[in-house]
């Protein structure tokens, strides 16, 4: 049998951090999430798989808008009309979602949870447990049914798997225990970067987020098709993401003429264009004369004539040979302070507090590993301001 395995669709994700900088990109990204799911169902039908498996976080929260709910129902109905059943579980994001609140999902759509953890389809047993609360700190594995003897067994689990670095520890599970449970295949969710694990003839696959939502998820964009037969399951990856993220650099140190800047921006941004995808660009510009705000305005003007490319953010880096001024003594002291352990620790604590206070949709911008970039960006902005003041 062949299964299309996906997870972490995050329908209805508000993408607030992008929306604040570029509303057009935010709208495109929301549509890209839907487009990716349409591609998933298209691929399931074209490949004539035996089941579509969704391992949690289909929605971004437990109160999806009716438009997102109707979209999911329509897409799963397309699969059902092609005689492809869907097996799914709830993840930590859609933990409290009542999938039946607006009517039954359909005769070929099977939600697995603690009251109905197993379902047999064409001789294969599917087992899964759904999140019933947004935070689960213990492993689900001890509560999973024992495998059905003499049959193929497939498990669906939403898990951080050994408390994966960089991810919140939701339902952490030992990889060794998981692979020894007795199932032939594990279809996992929660980690947005795809990977697979193999132990003997047992395969565990993390399909990854099918449509990345920000620069921290650039390793996503795929689903997995798994063939389950005699011996080790076979896996193949398919690209379904419709919008990609890329970073590039541009040196404008010796450029002060606006037409020349426009020309250089046009060349750089045209080089990022991909005819198969929409592209979000994060541009790092080296300049001692221009603010990020000004460069963003110029870049957006250039993009009026370049299809499918959007500016996410422009970061300005001050060249090392910046003309010295009376303000440079202050800047040197500020840079020295940045490297002090006490300052680093205090900054990390402030960043943590902000992550706890702000909506989680924008906290990807405040990840701990982004601290150095944020501090450098602040120093660059101060440098530009001080030098502009000295020139006046």
Image (spheres, rainbow, N blue to C red):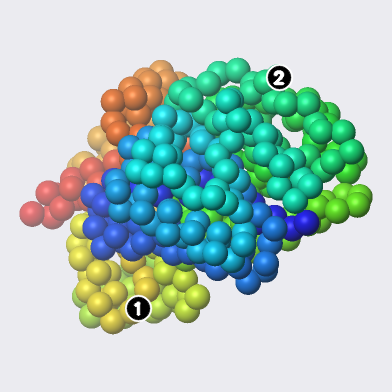
Query: In the image, 124: left or right of 189?
Result: right
Q: Of residues 287 and 164, which is closer to you in this image?
A: 164
Q: Residue 124, how many percent across, how many down?
A: 77, 45
Query: In the image, 202: left or right of 160?
Result: right
- Residue 240 in sight here: no
At x 40%, y 49%, the residue is 11
User: Which numbered mark, 2 or 1, is in the foreground of this view?
Assistant: 2
Residue 158, disc = none
User: Alpha-carbon neighbours of circle 2 within 10 Å: few (<14), some, or many (≥20)?
Assistant: few
Q: Of residues 319 and 371, which is closer to you in this image?
A: 371
Q: Which residue is mark 2?
A: 142
Q: Of residues 248 and 255, which is closer to you in this image?
A: 248
Helix, strand or loop for disc 2: helix
Q: Is residue 272 above or below residue 354?
A: below
Q: Residue 203, how many percent across, how many down?
A: 79, 44
Q: Residue 102, how many percent across, how many down?
A: 35, 43
Q: Is residue 125 above or below residue 307?
A: above
Marks 2/1: CA–CA distance: 51 Å
Residue 307, disc = 1
- Residue 269 in sight here: yes
Q: Quadrant of the N terminus?
A: bottom right
Residue 343: which quarter of the image?
top left
User: Alpha-carbon neighbours of circle 1 within 10 Å: few (<14), some, or many (≥20)?
Assistant: few
**Farthest residue, direction left:** 392
Q: Earlier in the sequence, mark 2 or mark 1?
A: 2
Q: Is residue 316 above or below residue 328?
A: below
Q: Of residues 120 and 204, which is closer to you in this image?
A: 120
Helix, strand or loop for disc 1: loop
């Amino acid at each position: 049998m062949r299964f299309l395995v996906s997870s972490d669709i995050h329908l209805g994700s508000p993408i607030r951090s992008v929306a604040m900088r570029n509303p057009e990109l935010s709208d495109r990204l929301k549509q890209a999430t839907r487009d990716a799911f349409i591609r998933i169902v298209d691929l399931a039908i074209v490949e004539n798989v035996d089941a579509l498996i969704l391992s949690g976080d289909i929605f971004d929260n437990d109160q999806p808008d009716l438009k997102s709910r109707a979209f999911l129902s329509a897409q799963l109905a397309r699969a059902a009309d092609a005689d492809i059943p869907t097996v799914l579980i709830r993840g930590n994001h859609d933990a409290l979602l009542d999938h039946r609140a607006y009517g039954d999902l359909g005769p070929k759509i099977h939600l697995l949870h603690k009251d109905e953890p197993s379902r047999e389809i064409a001789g294969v047993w599917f087992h899964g447990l759904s999140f019933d609360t947004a935070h689960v700190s213990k492993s689900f594995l001890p509560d999973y049914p024992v495998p059905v003897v003499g049959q193929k067994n497939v498990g669906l689990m939403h898990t951080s798997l050994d408390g994966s670095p960089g991810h919140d520890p939701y339902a952490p599970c030992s990889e060794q225990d998981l692979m020894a449970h007795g199932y032939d295949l594990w279809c996992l969710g929660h980690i947005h970067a795809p990977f697979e694990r193999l132990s003997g003839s047992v395969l565990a696959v993390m399909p990854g987020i099918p449509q990345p939502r920000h620069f921290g998820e650039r390793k996503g964009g795929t689903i997995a098709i798994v063939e389950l037969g005699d011996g080790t399951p076979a896996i193949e990856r398919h690209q379904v993401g419709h919008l990609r993220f890329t970073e590039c650099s541009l040196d404008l140190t010796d450029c002060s003429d606006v037409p020349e800047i426009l020309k250089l921006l046009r060349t750089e941004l045209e080089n990022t264009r991909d005819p198969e995808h929409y592209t979000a660009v994060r541009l790092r510009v080296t300049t001692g004369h221009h603010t990020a705000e000004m460069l963003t305005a110029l870049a957006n003007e250039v993009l009026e004539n370049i299809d499918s490319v959007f500016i996410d953010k422009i970061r300005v880096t001050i060249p090392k040979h910046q003309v010295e001024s009376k303000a440079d003594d202050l800047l040197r002291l500020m840079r020295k302070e940045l490297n002090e352990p006490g300052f680093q620790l205090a900054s990390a604590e402030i960043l943590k507090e902000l992550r706890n206070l702000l909506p989680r949709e924008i906290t990807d911008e405040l990840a701990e590993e982004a601290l150095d970039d944020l501090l450098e960006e602040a120093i660059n902005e101060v440098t530009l301001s001080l030098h502009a003041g000295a020139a006046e």
